[in-house]
Amino acid sequence: MVPDIGRGSRTHGLLVYLYGPGRREEHTDAHLVGSWDGFAPDPGRDTDPHVTLARLTAALDLRVKQAGDRAPAKHVWHCSVRTAPGDRRLSDEEWNAVAQRIVHATGIAPDGDPDGCRWIAVRHAEDHIHIVATLVRGDLRNPRLNYDFNKAQAVCRRIEEEMGLRRLNAGDGTAAKNPTSAEKFKAERTGRPETSRETLREAVRQAVAGADDEKEFFARLREAGLRVKVRHAPSGDALGYNVALPGDRNRHGEPVWYPGSKLAPDLSLPKIRLRLADGTAERATSSAADGRADWSPPARERRSATRIAERGAVLLDGDDDEAAAQLVGIGELLDAVAQTSPAATRAELAAAARAFERATRSHIRAERADTRALRTAARGIVQAGGALGRGEDGGTTAMLVSTLVLVTLAAARWHSARGHAQQAHASRQAAEYLRTAYRQAAATPMRVLHDQGRALPESIRRKHEATIRTVLPEQDARTEGASTKTDALAATLAQAEEAGHDPMALLQQTIAMRELDTAENVNDVLVWRLRRLAHLPAHPGEAPRRPPASSRTAKTSANLTSERKTAPPAAPRIRPPRR
C-alpha cells in the first residue's frame, strides 16, 4: 500500500479532477467512501453533481475562509493511497477504515478530536483512493503535520499486515524523487519510454562514474547531449547545476530544467564534489598485475575491475559501517560497465545499474570513505571504450559480471543486517539482472571450455577431477553428471598447470578468497577466478602463454600473496550450486 502526499491551494480544482473523467478517461464511478463526519455531500451520488460539487467545496473550505489571513497559502492536503499490484479488491468500508487511520496517524483528524481538520476520501478506481483535507482545524489553528509522509508510510505497513495485503518495503527518505503524474503523461504523449527526470538521472550518474574532476563531469554531461546550466557565485565558483533534455520544453517554449538535487539526493553538486574529492588512484603503467600487455584495453580494464570488485565484496562481508563507501563505488562501476558493455548484455546491465542506484544510498555515512580503487576501475572502463561481445573482451565481461553478482548479493546482506529493506531488495534485483547478463556473456566461452574439458586425455582429466574432489568434497565427481559439471573447471586447471601453476594450491587459494554460498554455479565462479589469477585468457580459444621456467614459481607466489590480503582466514563451507 503506497501513500503519496502533496499540497495545493485549489480545493475546487482538485475535486473537479477527482470527480471528472481523468486525463485518459480512467476515472469510473467516482464517489465518497468516507468524510470527517460521515455526512458530506457526494457529487458522485447526486442528480445535480455540479451543484453538489460546489456545496462540498464550500463545506471543506469553511474553516479556511473563517481563518482568513491565518490560513496557510497551500491549505489543501492531498494523499493518494494505492494497493500493490495483485492485492485483493478492498470494499468501500475497508477504504473508509484506511482513510480514517491515515488522517489520525498524520495528525489531520486525530480520533476523538472534535476540532480535527475536515477531510473526505474519494474513490474512482478499484485499487486506490484520494484523501483531501483542508488544513485549518475547528479552533482555527493549523494542524501539526511534522513527518506526515513517514507516519502515513508506517500506518500503511500496519494496515498491510492486518488486512493480508502485500507487504511493501518501508522507505527511509533516501530514495530519489519519483516522476510526477504530469511527467508520466507527458512522456506517454511524446512517445518517450520514460520520463525526462529518469533519463536525466541515469545520464548524470553515468557522467559521474569515474570522473576525475568537476570540469570533466560537466564535459561528460555535454558530450551526452544534455543541456547544462551552471549557477555561479559572484566569485565565479559554481554553486549548482541544472540539466535539461534537448527538445523538452514547457508550455511557454522554455527548456524544462532539473537541478541535480531533484534528480537524486546524491546528485547535487556538493554531494558530487565530495565524491570527486575522493579522487582516483594513479593507474599503473605495467599490465603485469592484470594480464597480458597485448590484450585489448577493455579486456585489461575489466580484469582489473574484477580484482577490485572482489575486494569490495570482502569489505561488505566484514559487516563494517565503513563499507557504505564501497556501495557508492560499486554503483559507479556498474554505471561504467553498463555504458560500455556489448550490445547483447547492455540492456540487462543498464537495468542492474538502475536498480542498484537505490542500494547506494542510506543514512549510514562512512567516516573514512575511500572509493579510489573502485572509482579508478570505473574510470579505466569508461576511458577504454566499448568492449566487443566476442573474444577476450566478451570473456572478460563474463568474468567481471560473475563477480558483480556476488558483490551485489553481499550488498543485500549488508543492507539486510541494518534493516534497509528497500536497499536490500534493490541489491537482490540488481543481482538478478546481472545473472541474466552473465548467462548471455558466458554462453560462448563456457561452451568452449566444456568442450576442451571433454577433449582432455583421460589420465589428465582424471587427475584434475581428483584435485576437484579433494578440494571440493561436496562436488563428488562420482555422482551422476558431476564430470559434465566440472569439465570447464578441469580444463582451466589443466591450462593453469600448463602455464606453470600448481593446480591444487591455486584452487585452494581461489576458494579461500571469499564465500561461495550465494553463487548460482560454484564451478563457473571458480573458473573465472582461476583464469584471472593464473592470467589465462578469459576467452579459452586463445592459447595461454607459458612463462619462463625461472619466473613460474615467483609469479604464482606473487599472485597468491596479492589475493591472500583480501582472503578470509579459513576456507568456508561450500554448498553445492543451485540447479
Image (spheres, rainbow, N blue to C red):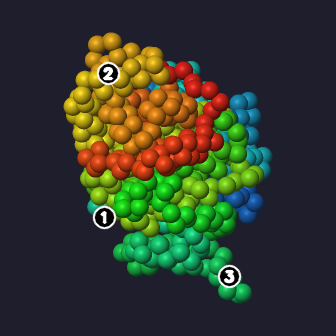
Specify which label sits upstream in the sequence, 3 or 2. 3
In x, y percent, where is residue 179? Answer: 47, 55
Residue 389 falls left or right of residue 117: left
The quarter of the picture where the C terminus appears is top left
Q: How many marks?
A: 3
Q: Residues within 10 Å of mark 2 (few under 14, many from 20)?
A: some
Specify which label sits upstream in the sequence, 3 or 1. 1
Query: Can residue 528 be seen at all in this image of the molecule?
Result: no
Q: Secondary structure at mark 1?
A: helix
Q: CA distance from mark 3 to mark 2?
A: 68 Å
Residue at which label 2 appears: 462
Q: CA distance from mark 2 to mark 1?
A: 63 Å
Q: As shown in the figure, which amino acid type bears the numbered disc 1?
A: Thr
Q: As shown in the figure, which amino acid type bears the numbered disc 3?
A: Asp
Circle nearer the viewer, 2 or 1: 2
In x, y percent, where is residue 219? Answer: 49, 77
Residue 86 picture quarter:
top left
Q: Residues within 10 Å of mark 3 (few under 14, many from 20)?
A: few
In x, y percent, where is residue 331? Answer: 52, 52
Residue 511 disc label: none
Q: CA distance from mark 3 to mark 1?
A: 37 Å
Residue at the image position 42 percent from the left and 28 percent from the top:
522
Circle nearer the viewer, 3 or 1: 3
Query: Can residue 211 be seen at all in this image of the molecule?
Result: yes
Q: As shown in the figure, which amino acid type bears the numbered disc 2?
A: Arg
Residue at the image position 50 percent from the left and 31 percent from the top:
505
Seen from the viewer's position, the closer of residues 543 and 90 is 543
Residue at which label 1 appears: 190
